[in-house]
């Protein structure tokens, strides 16, 4: 049976011991942790797990519980939008045939989080009428509670009241995506204009979500998710961001990959750079392909262990 992936995003990126305890909880019940990406400016950690159906279910419930115990949104600060301690919890089928299993696992997790942990659970993606997390996160926890009180939204599982400290859980089933940030050598206004120019919702690239953010020490970032990797490969999005920034008199610095990426993203970027056979016989990118894709993505280095298939073989 093929493994399922999950990539929980938790609202803690500054307390190393808390992140370690949460990551251990996610991976301590049969799931295997592949990567933990921690960002202090976003105050967020992104944890990548794989496992069989039971391991993913048990790991997600345990990890959400640990995040609920360790994170208090009432004192939380960070540039990334959020409505929960365990903010976004997707279950990801690594092959199309696994979609039904991913749905079953996600719904089981949602029921248990509502009943056992007492947190409201909102559904997105394949189990939420195609909605994306941004639909729920706009305005933060207070606005989400107002929409529930007004009858505009209703959690699928759990109470109607958000927990004061732990908020709500956004639980979904989705295809693999790539989370990717780019440093912008310009102003916040330019970063926001560039983000608007490339994101799908404002007429940009299909399958791209983007925000312009100010980080610590005056650094500026265009933060993105590429949610349709066939419509817009990540390297194409990077090219577009560079062009949009240049049109506004700004430059783009280094890229930052959040979590892991599929081998096919490396392969298509490498082919665009002239590499004819980017994958080896296991379906893992060879070093020349990694180097070429890293250049296309403006990464200082792209290692094989940042590719999910490398872990699976």
Image (tube, grey):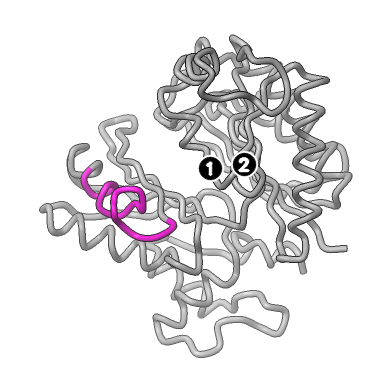
- Looking at the image, which is closer to me, 84 or 24? 84
Q: Which mark is residue 296?
A: none
Magenta segment: 193-207
Q: Position of residue 82 (x, y in %)?
A: 50, 27
Q: Is residue 32 magenta?
A: no
Disc 1 packing (10 Å; few <14; some 14–19; many ≥20): some
| Label 1 – label 2 distance at C-alpha | 6 Å
- Side (left or right) of 87 relative to 230: right
- Marks 2 and 1: in contact by CB < 8 Å? yes
Q: Which quadrant is home to the N terminus? A: bottom right
Q: Which mark is residue 131?
A: 1
Q: Is residue 203 magenta?
A: yes
| Residue 17 visible from this viewpoint | no
* Circle 1 SS class: loop
Q: Which mark is residue 128?
A: 2
| 99 vs 105: above or below | below
- Side (left or right) of 41 relative to 215: right
The answer to which quarter of the image holds residue 100 is bottom right
Q: Residue at coordinates 28% horizontally, 63% vertically from top-left?
A: 240
């Amino acid at each position: 049976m093929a493994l399922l992936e999950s990539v929980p995003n938790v609202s803690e990126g500054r307390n190393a011991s808390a992140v370690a305890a949460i990551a251990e909880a996610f991976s301590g019940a049969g799931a295997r942790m592949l990567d933990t990406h921690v960002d202090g400016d976003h105050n967020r950690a992104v944890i990548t797990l794989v496992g069989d159906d039971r391991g993913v279910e048990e790991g997600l419930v345990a990890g959400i519980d640990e995040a609920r115990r360790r994170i208090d949104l009432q004192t939380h600060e960070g540039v990334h939008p959020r409505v929960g301690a365990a903010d976004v919890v997707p279950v990801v089928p690594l092959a199309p045939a696994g979609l039904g299993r991913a749905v079953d696992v996600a719904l089981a997790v949602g029921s248990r989080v509502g009943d056992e942990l007492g947190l409201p659970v909102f559904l997105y993606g394949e189990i939420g009428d195609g909605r994306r997390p941004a639909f729920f996160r706009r305005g933060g926890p207070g606005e989400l509670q107002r929409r529930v009180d007004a009858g505009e939204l209703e959690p699928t599982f759990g109470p109607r009241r958000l927990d004061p400290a732990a908020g709500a859980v956004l639980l979904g089933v989705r295809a693999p995506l790539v989370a990717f940030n780019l440093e912008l050598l310009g102003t916040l206004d330019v970063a926001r204009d560039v983000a608007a120019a490339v994101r799908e919702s404002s007429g940009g690239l299909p399958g791209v979500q983007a925000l312009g953010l100010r980080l610590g020490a005056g650094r500026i970032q265009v933060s993105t998710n590429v949610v349709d990797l066939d419509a817009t490969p990540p390297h194409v999005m990077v090219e577009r961001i560079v062009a949009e920034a240049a049109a506004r008199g700004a430059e783009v610095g280094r890229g930052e990959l959040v979590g892991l990426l599929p081998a096919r993203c490396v392969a298509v970027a490498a082919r665009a750079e002239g590499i004819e056979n980017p994958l080896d016989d296991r379906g893992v990118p060879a070093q020349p392909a990694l180097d070429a894709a890293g250049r296309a993505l403006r990464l200082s280095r792209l290692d094989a262990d940042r590719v999910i298939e490398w872990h699976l073989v």
